[in-house]
Every structure is written in structure tokens, then in C-alpha cells.
Image (tube, rainbow, N blue to C red):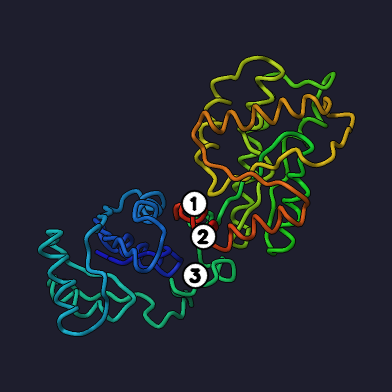
Amino acid sequence: MALGKYAPLHRGHQLVIETALSEMDETVVIVYDAPETTSVPLAVRSGWIRALYPSVRVIEAWDGPNEVGYTPELMRTHERYVIDALGIGGITHFYSSEPYGDHMSRALGAIDRRVDEARRRVPVSARDVRRDPCAHREYVHPLVYRDLIVNVALLGAPSSGKTTLAERLARELDTQWMPEYGREYWEKHQVDRRLDPNQLVEIAEGHLEREDALLTQSNRYLFTDTNALTTVTFARYYHGTVSPRLAELADRAARRYDLTFVCDIDVPYDDTWDRSGEVNRAAFQRQVIGDLNERKAPFIMLRGTLDERVARVRAVLNRFSKYTNVLEVLEDAER
């Protein structure tokens, strides 16, 4: 058995779990809620372990003790919680890399199995990762790391300034941005300025694949230029219908992003050959906003110059952290 906050799960935690799996017939991992330590929900943290180690029995400790330490009272509190509240028994080996392995193993009547307690094999702590995930990225599994990045979607009609804004934000915040894959795909595959419905699905799927890769390379934020919601709007505009697969990808996109900004069309229209005119830009913008409203997906409008838009986004980011309520952030900004 092992226990912890896994806030976040890192290679040191994985070494402990993998050692237990290699030595034991069955492995149990208890994950504490720990709201005082991390905003990452317990379900997300336990989900990492379930995804990486399907054979592990994961127990979510929603009402576990919040205080940690080595006073007799605190040690007994944790012991009684594990044994009495969670009903844990029959443990033969207790795995950890911390001093609490001593008292927990004695309370459980188990062998105290310490793994890399000196942190020589994996020289990192969860506190290090929380402080600067990017600097310690090599010690965090990609599945976990991408869940630590604030993924920011920039939506809006063609020629509304999304690409320019994404590039600028990524440069200023020393991170990555996800270019609009649909534009690249369109330039390679369009016939008479059109794509068929199956090709629009390929755009949405290819975009997600590239976006997932960039999440693992980003520093705190990823700025994503459009997503499947935009592709759906093109499908309706050109074909009058949306394929089931594209609709599914759009539904996922409506829930995928931590923040969504919509760039207004109060900027000069760039009338390039691949675009269909300023009148269509206005109609497209209404569809983008209407789709978000229909899905009840929260978004923030960006207006004005590039500098004003950048300032607005950064003001929101300064108040926002992943897994927090964006409405509370906006309320704070209005005070």
C-alpha cells in the first residue's frame, strides 16, 4: 500500500508505485483530497494513477486529515483515519519515500518499505513541481503535465486577430501557441476553395493531435488559435450539416479549454484570397458567438487594439489558476 496527495504525481511517486507493483500481488494507493495544498481536483489526481496503473486499487480520501506532521496527535489522526475511517487492513507492506513510513507501517502491522528516501534516483518533490512545472518537466509524465497547463482558446471569425494575438501572448509569456491547423490543411487540400465533410473531421482530429503534443512542451499556458467549434461553423456554412464525428469533437472542445476568448471584428478586414469577404466575416462571427451561447460555454470578448487585447488577457491570467471558477475571477476583476 502507498498513500499521498500526488499534488502532482511525479516520477518519484511513480517509482514508489512501480516498486510496489513489481514486488506485490496487489497494490492499494490512497489519494488524499488536500484542497489546502492544490487546486487540482482529487478526481483528476486519482485519474492519473488509474490511467497509468490500471491494476492498482485507488481509494479517494475525500475527508482525510488536512494537517501533516510528526506530533503524536497528528500521527495517530492519520493512522486512525486509514485504519478506522477507510477500513484498511491486511496490509503486508507499506511503501513510501517519507519518514511517515515508520509510524504508518507500525500501525498497519506492515513492513516499512522505503523507496529512494534520499531522492537520489528522482531528485524532485511535489512542491518543486507545483512551484515551477516547466522547470521540472522531465520528472512529470506527459499525461500529468498537460493537466497542469492552462489551455487558452482564441476564437472568432476569420481576420479577427487571433493568430497575431496568440503569437504575441506566447512570446511575452515564454510559452507555446497552437497555430490554426485548418488553415495549413486547407492550403494543401482545398479544391475550388472547398473541403469535403470528411476533410473537416481530419482538420479537427489533426488539430487535437498537435495541440496535445504542444501541451507537453508549454510553460504554464498554451494559446490555441481556433478549435473544433470553428470547424463546425465552417461545416454548417459550406455544407449545411455537421457529421456525427465532427459534432462529437466540437462537444469535447466546448469543455476542453480552461479559458475561451473571442476576438471581436473591430479590426480592419484583411481581404486575402482565401477569405470570403467582410460581410461573411460578420455573419461568421455571429455564428461563433451563437454557438458558444447555445452550448452555455463561458467566454470573454476581446476588443480594441492588439495592446489592449493583450492587456485584457494578461489581467485575467494574473487572477486565474487552473481548476478555479472563471466567474469568480471576473467578479474580482470588476471590483
Residue on which the image places disc 2? 335
Residue 172's spot in the image, x, y percent?
Answer: 72, 63
What number of labels is visible? 3
The local crowd at label 2, few if under 14, some if 14 to 19, many if 20 or more residues have their Cα within 10 Å, is few
Residue on which the image places disc 1? 326
Q: Residue at x 62, y 41 (%)?
A: 209
Q: Residue at x 83, y 20 (%)?
A: 191
Extreme residue in the front direction: 335
The local crowd at label 1, few if under 14, some if 14 to 19, many if 20 or more residues have their Cα within 10 Å, is some
Q: Mark 2 or 3 closer to N-term?
A: 3
Vertical position of residue 210 compared to residue 77: above or below: above
* Mark 1: amino acid: Val
Residue 24's spot in the image, x, y percent?
Answer: 26, 61
Q: Secondary structure at mark 1?
A: helix
**Cα distance between the residues tagged 2 and 1:** 15 Å
Q: Nearer the viewer, mark 2 or mark 1?
A: 2
Label ID, residue 129: 3
In this picture, residue 22 sits left or right of residue 315: left
Extreme residue in the bottom direction: 71
Q: Secondary structure at mark 3?
A: helix
The local crowd at label 3, few if under 14, some if 14 to 19, many if 20 or more residues have their Cα within 10 Å, is many
Label ID, residue 304: none
* Mark 2: amino acid: Arg
Q: Nearer the viewer, residue 138 or 231?
A: 231
Q: Residue at x 22, y 60 (%)?
A: 63
**Cα distance between the residues tagged 1 and 3:** 24 Å
